[in-house]
Image (tube, rainbow, N blue to C red):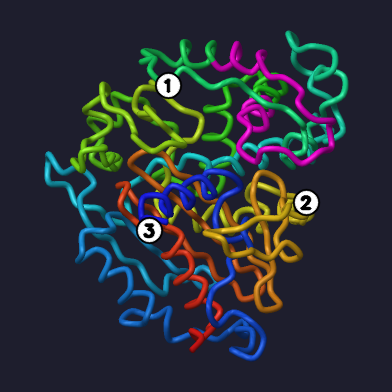
Amino acid sequence: MDSHSVRGIDRRRLIGWGGLAAIGAPFAGAGPGHAAPATPDRIPPDTRPGGAYDRYVAQLAAEGRFSGMVLLSHRGRTVLSRSYGLADREKGIRNHEGIAVSLSSAAKPFCAVAILQLVQQGRVRLTDTVGTYLTGFPAEIADHVTIHHMLSDTSGLNTPAQDLQRIFHSREEVHDYHEQWTRQATLVAAPGTGTDGHSGANFAIPAQIVEAGTGMTYWDYVEQNIFRRAGMRGSGFFTRPQWLTDPHIAHSYMRQADGSVVDAVRNLDKGSPDEYQLGKNPARSFIDYDGFATAPDLVRFAHAIYDGRVLERPYGEVLTAAKIPHGPQSEGGRAASVETSFGAYSMAVSIHQGQWLYGRAGVNPGSAANWNIYPHTGWVGVILSNSDDGPLREILEQELRAVTGAQAGA
């Protein structure tokens, strides 16, 4: 298997449920007998500046294989924060902690949090069906697919491919398109059946339920009730004009089939050659439903899930509780652990060395994002990349090894 094929597998799997928590993430040295589980107050040496993780990412950046930010936080205190490369190559603006990067699917848990806010207020029930709030869906969807089904990716829904070539010019145009697009969803399996973890309906329909339940656009609701309450001052649902002009938003650099690299937001005629996102350019959407975030803001979000700022603690536990086991999976011909990897609400959770790992990844042409929560020991890890060249899965494995204190196998 060549490197492009491996990269395609990594991107596809990360686009799906996302991150190491989704795929069991076996790696050398993670098994019994190699290392004891990290203790809550211990700072593993590999997480510190100059440690193995720091050196690994620095080497990638020196080789031109990583542009972006990595951050490790322990109990709310930053242990390691590094930024590499340029956020805007044309203007020479460097990446730094205050730079926001396109999140893609790493933003989907925001929607689950928004729904759970409405649940804890008694305005929505997880057992409510699509038809309780929205019109225009066939009875088999409206009357039988619940909010729980969609948040847990067990809706049985499938959505048609989006028009990736269309260039949008307003918030209203994007909103109307997505409303019409979700009405084209079809039921391909019985509700309650685990289906494609990247079915667009499982995110887009709950987002519209948030709108129906609040009278606000999804963008405004999340910014006011999640970003502001969590202190995520550098994050938002930015429009294409903002993306072009705001020096705090990283441009996304897409690798083309001929090996060249183009700035997505300045080259709307260019798309990704990746077979799983063929032709896509995220900047063609005037505004998207994924948004942008800085690395410190994602740490703030991770803590806000439990500390009462965005959810009461029991509902934070509802968000991250294991709902369904992930099905048989493999990565490059290597079997991943089925027994220790589960789907939660719009994110994945798994067990590593006797402790939970919660996380979500997202990949867009020209960018990649991942945030991991290690609740047993109080760690949060964030990786943000604004180019196609970063080996996200390998960086994630290095983060996991550093945080848990596991040693590489012989």
Q: CA distance from mark 3 to mark 1?
A: 25 Å
For residue 338, side relative to residue 91 (left or right) = right
Label 1 residue SS: loop
* Residue 239 vertical position relative to residue 343 in the rendered view, above or below: above
Q: Position of residue 7 (x, y in %)?
A: 41, 52
Check contact, mark 2 vs mark 1: CB within 8 A.
no
Residue, disc 2: 318
Q: Quadrant of residue 250?
A: top left
Give the mark nearest the N terminus, 2 or 1: 1
Q: How many marks?
A: 3
Callout 3 touching callout 1 (CB < 8 Å)? no
Marks 3, 2: nearer the viewer: 3
Residue drawn at 27 percent across, 55 percent down: 67
Amino acid tagged 2? Val
x then y, percent, for residue 178: 56, 17
Residue holding disc 1: 164
- Is 112 one of the magenta-colored residues? no
Which mark is nearer the camera, 2 or 1?
1
Q: Is residue 116 visible?
A: no
Res. 257 image quadrant: top left
Q: Quadrant of residue 133?
A: top right
What's the magenta region? 178-207
Q: Amino acid at mark 3?
A: Pro
Residue receiving disc 3: 391
Nearer-N-terminus badge (3/2): 2
> Which x, y percent locates residue 301?
55, 52
